[in-house]
Amino acid sequence: MNLTTLLFISLLLFGFLTSDFKSEQKKYARVREAYAEKETAVKSVLKSNAISMESIQLLLISYKAEQELEVWATDNNHSSFKKIITYPVCAASGVAGPKVKSGDLQVPEGFYHISTFNPVSSYHLSLKVNYPNAADRIRSKGLNPGGDIFIHGKCVTIGCLPLTDNKIKELYILAIEARNNG
């Protein structure tokens, strides 16, 4: 086996040479169901905001006290983000203030990105945020800061941002499209 073959195999193992991300996600029944039920509505929201699904980029902003998750979007045709949807967070835990340690029931406060898409979540569909980040580890002062913070379906939480199953389908589609666009 030559070096080119070895590189090709390792890239396949890590998913870099698979078909596009959207196609991979659509192999799962819940994702296909989400697209069947919500793709038209998602496209309508994007069209009414003059945002192209083919080059969408997302910014999600959560407000703990208001129990809202705002979805901001832009695309290759625009230079700034525009708020396109606000979802109610359907359950909350913890009190005002940041998450400091595992089990404190707090929703993290900070800047995060979506690190994992889970199409077979126990909470219908879920998007994992990259908590804890470097600032969270400093804030925890050596304590276990916890982890597994998600935006998900079902209205239960011990530190996550739950939307209804109906609403996570829309957000999951938007996130897939943004991820698929790079």
Image: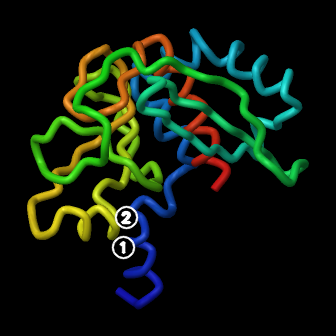
Q: Nearer the viewer, residue 3 or 103?
A: 103
Q: Residue 161: x percent and y percent?
A: 36, 30
Does 62 sit left or right of 153 as displayed?
A: right
Q: Residue 96: x percent and y percent?
A: 31, 36
Q: Nearer the viewer, residue 171 or 17?
A: 171
The quadrant in which the N terminus is found is: bottom left
Q: Residue 55: x percent and y percent?
A: 76, 46
Disc 2: CA contacts within 10 A as few (<14), some (14-19) or many (>=20): few
Q: Residue 179: x percent and y percent?
A: 58, 48
The residue that appears at 49% across and 34% down in the rendered structure is 63
The quadrant in which the C terminus is found is: bottom right
Residue 4, compared with residue 119, is above or below; it is: below
Element on which disc 2 rests: loop
Please tell me in which quadrant of the rendered image residue 51 appears: top right
**Residue 14: which numbered mark, if any?**
2
Disc 1: CA contacts within 10 A as few (<14), some (14-19) or many (>=20): few
**Residue 66: which numbered mark, if any?**
none
Residue 77, compared with residue 26, is above or below; it is: below
Element on which disc 1 rests: helix
The residue that appears at 48% across and 24% down in the rendered structure is 66
The residue that appears at 11% across and 69% down in the rendered structure is 142
Q: Are marks 2 and 1 in contact (CB under 8 Å)?
A: yes
Q: Which residue is mark 1?
A: 10
Does 91 sit left or right of 163 as displayed?
A: left
* Amino acid on which disc 1 is placed: Ser
* Amino acid on which disc 2 is placed: Phe
Q: Nearer the viewer, residue 43 or 83?
A: 83
Please tell me in which quadrant of the rendered image residue 39 appears: top right
Label 2 or label 1, whichever lies nearer to me, is 2
What is the CA distance from the residue labelled 2 to the residue labelled 1? 6 Å
